[in-house]
């Protein structure tokens, strides 16, 4: 490395180290410690008391009491999760909904991002604004707006009736279709933006080179554009998939009540059943499930960095 | 797709007829006509924004001309899509596919041409040998040096054996030494394959080194098409004379015309005699142009010189600046009129260093035959 590199490294040693530590402190304080609480509660038993679980660690009660509290922890709640269909089905439904809606998001978001990236420069900023503008309105209000549109005498049914497409109102609300519509609508920017970022910085000469070497426009897309946009695809997929698995508001407001996503189950355990330990164990399992795609993504990114280096 | 096969001898491989292209109100290419024969190494030379790259992109099919025809082998390809043309291009920054290995980059075009697997492997091996890259088949482009990437790009564009190879500033990203070596390798490859190459460059030295003919472009027009020697020794306009190489210009009025000699009264250098230009001068105001290396210098007035007449143009001045360039030394000479001329001398011996330093009074002289008379 050049001399300049070495000297910059020296200059920034102190502050660089500090700035590297800050996120770790943040993670420990606001993620790891709370997670420790949740993990501990998930190993506890529910009781009708304040707090609604036992045992409680009391640091003032002495060593023996603390030891007794430790031995009272058990995996009972996790056994319940695998033995009761309710939870397994919720997890499975969450994963299926997340997979299906992420696939829809990719199919809808990719052409939009591609089109945006091919717009003349001065139009790209405007297109980007249009994608971001819905964020200026509260997410809840936007979902309630969809309820208005989809309900029995809502906008959609009135329009269909006026156009004589249907003879009587169609049930849209409280269906899976309404839920998917809500999810795709809400998460689309999270799919479009990373895809757009990857596609916009791609050298247009690469696609020209593909065409020049005899590839049809479709071949250019599949052999050049798409493989090179995979980092953006991975980012968009994860940005959508992970929060959708734990989604609570959209299925609660737009889907029917016959089957629940895991976020709804968790809410029920916590607020309706007041069973903190089971709710906590549901959360812990959810987190472990979501770690899998995150680790895969991390591995992919690291491999890419290694190849680039 | 073998280049030039079955072509009538008088028909050029490529004929560009009145091609024009505008972007909005900007006329990038403004009525260019040009014939290129099979097997030629042709250079499009011009400053940035002169339209040379746009013209090349129209040959590749990335731009569609607003007007005119592009005949390749007698067929108008102006509207043919890029992937259906028997033309390949080597891109300025190579545009290698970063996700594919060297082998797959070179094989990309061959697979599209539906060659058999064995043929593809053979052709890739042949190309790797041609550009001396054996052993690097499995590398990714970002694991290669700049020079190696340039070779992969060349191999990839040659692999389909195009009738016409377009090279867009192919050496601009290389350092000077490597660029010079690669110029000769390009010529060698072109000669060996007998293909037709069209190179776009803003570097006149590069154009003169590699090309057998050069088209100089300015403001969307083709100003002169000539061999490197013609372009340098007989530029058609003042602009070309100044763009290609270094030149001294003296503006003046034609005073008399005798025995194919033109006497011009110049503002800066008095009366100069030049050989009558091939295309007769019509306007009274002309430029007498002389290349620096055609001016001879000495510290005293040459008493005797070979041929006598060669010393007709004689200028006296004071050396103001000396630039030693190794092979040659360039002197700046301030004339009595205040004008500064440049003269360069070949350093044919090791001694004689700094013979004429700044402040030295010198005489510069040059032959009428070495002058070029140009109109504005």
Image (spheres, helix red, strand yellow):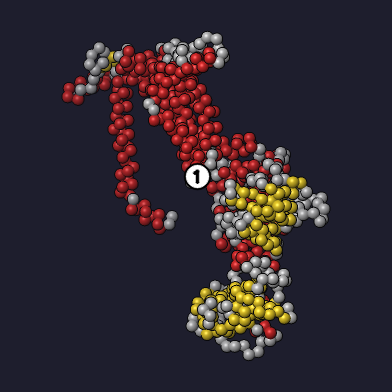
Residue B161 % position (x, y): 71, 48
In the rendered image, the residue lying farthest to the front is B284
Label 1: state its secondary structure.
helix
Q: How many marks?
A: 1
Residue furthest toward the top?
Answer: A168
Query: Which residue sits at x=34%, y=53%?
Result: A10
Residue B99 in the image: state x and y as whole percent.
56, 41
Give the position of the C terminus of chain B as an image quadrant: bottom right
In the image, what residue occupies the spot 61% across and 46% down? B102
Q: Which residue is mark 1?
A: A308
Mark 1, chain letter? A
Q: Name the residue nearer the viewer: B34 or B169.
A: B34
- What residue do we see at 70% from left, 64% from top? B227
Q: Nearer the viewer, residue B191 or B321?
A: B321
| Quarter of the figure with residue B61 | top right
Q: Is residue B16 above or below residue A112?
A: below
Between B133 and B357, which is closer to the camera in this rendering?
A: B357
Residue A275: quadrant of the picture: top left
Query: From where the camera sits, is residue B37 visible?
Result: yes
Q: Is residue B358 above or below residue A147?
A: below
Label 1 neighbour load within 10 Å: few <14, some 14-19, many 20+: few
């Amino acid at each position: 490395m050049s001399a300049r590199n070495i000297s910059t490294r020296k200059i920034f040693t102190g502050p660089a180290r500090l700035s590297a530590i800050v996120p770790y402190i943040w993670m420990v304080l606001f993620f790891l410690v709370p997670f420790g609480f949740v993990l501990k509660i998930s190993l506890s038993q529910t009781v009708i008391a304040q707090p609604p679980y036992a045992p409680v660690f009391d640091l003032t009660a002495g060593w023996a009491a603390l030891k007794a509290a430790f031995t009272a922890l058990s995996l009972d709640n996790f056994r319940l999760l695998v033995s009761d269909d309710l939870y397994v089905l919720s997890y499975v439904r969450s994963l299926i909904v997340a997979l299906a809606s992420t696939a829809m998001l990719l199919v809808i978001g990719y052409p939009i991002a591609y089109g945006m990236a091919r717009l003349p420069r001065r139009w790209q900023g405007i297109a980007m604004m249009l994608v971001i503008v819905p964020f200026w309105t509260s997410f809840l209000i936007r979902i309630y707006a969809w309820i208005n549109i989809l309900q029995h005498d809502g906008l959609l049914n009135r329009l269909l009736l006026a156009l004589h497409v249907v003879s009587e109102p169609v049930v849209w609300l409280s269906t899976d279709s309404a839920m998917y519509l809500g999810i795709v609508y809400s998460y689309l920017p999270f799919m479009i933006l990373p895809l757009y970022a990857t596609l916009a910085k791609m050298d247009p000469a690469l696609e020209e080179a593909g065409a020049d070497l005899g590839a049809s426009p479709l071949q250019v897309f599949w052999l050049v554009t798409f493989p090179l946009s995979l980092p953006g695809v991975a980012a968009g997929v994860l940005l959508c998939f992970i929060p959708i698995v734990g989604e609570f508001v959209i299925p609660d407001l737009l889907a029917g009540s016959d089957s629940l996503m895991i976020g709804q189950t968790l809410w029920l355990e916590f607020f309706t059943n007041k069973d903190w330990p089971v709710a906590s164990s549901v959360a812990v399992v959810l987190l472990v499930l979501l770690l899998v795609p995150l680790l895969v993504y991390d591995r992919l990114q690291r491999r890419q960095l290694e190849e680039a280096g | 797709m073998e280049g030039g096969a079955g072509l009538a001898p008088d028909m050029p491989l490529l004929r560009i007829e009145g091609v024009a292209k505008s972007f909005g109100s900007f006329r990038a290419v403004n009525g260019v006509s040009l014939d290129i024969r099979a097997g030629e190494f042709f250079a499009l030379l011009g400053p940035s924004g002169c339209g040379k790259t746009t013209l090349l992109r129209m040959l590749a099919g990335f731009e569609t001309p607003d007007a005119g025809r592009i005949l390749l082998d007698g067929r108008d390809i102006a509207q043919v899509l890029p992937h259906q043309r028997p033309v390949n291009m080597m891109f300025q920054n190579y545009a290698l596919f970063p996700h594919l290995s060297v082998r797959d980059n070179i094989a990309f075009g061959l697979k599209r041409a539906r060659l058999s697997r064995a043929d593809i492997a053979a052709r890739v091996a042949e190309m790797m040998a041609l550009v001396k890259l054996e052993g690097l088949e499995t590398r990714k482009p970002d694991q290669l040096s700049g020079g190696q990437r340039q070779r992969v790009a060349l191999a990839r564009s040659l692999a389909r054996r195009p009738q016409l190879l377009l090279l867009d500033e192919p050496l601009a990203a290389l350092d000077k030494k490597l660029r010079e070596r690669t110029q000769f390798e390009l010529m060698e490859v072109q000669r060996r394959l007998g293909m037709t190459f069209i190179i776009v460059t803003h570097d006149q030295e590069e154009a003169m080194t590699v090309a057998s003919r050069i088209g100089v472009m300015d403001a969307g027009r083709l100003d002169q098409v000539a061999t490197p020697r013609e372009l340098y020794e007989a530029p058609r306009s003042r602009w070309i004379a100044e763009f290609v190489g270094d030149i001294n210009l003296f503006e003046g009025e034609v005073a008399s015309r005798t025995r194919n000699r033109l006497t011009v009264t110049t503002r800066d250098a008095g009366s100069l005699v030049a050989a009558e230009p091939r295309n007769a001068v019509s306007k009274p105001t002309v430029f007498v142009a002389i290349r620096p290396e055609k001016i001879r210098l000495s510290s005293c007035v040459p008493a005797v010189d070979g041929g006598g007449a060669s010393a007709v143009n004689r200028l006296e001045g004071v050396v103001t600046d000396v630039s030693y360039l190794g092979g040659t030394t360039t002197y700046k000479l301030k004339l009595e009129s205040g004008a500064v001329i440049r003269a360069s001398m070949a350093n044919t011996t090791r001694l004689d260093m700094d013979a004429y330093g700044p402040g030295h009074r010198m005489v510069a002289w040059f032959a009428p035959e070495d002058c070029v008379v140009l109109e504005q």
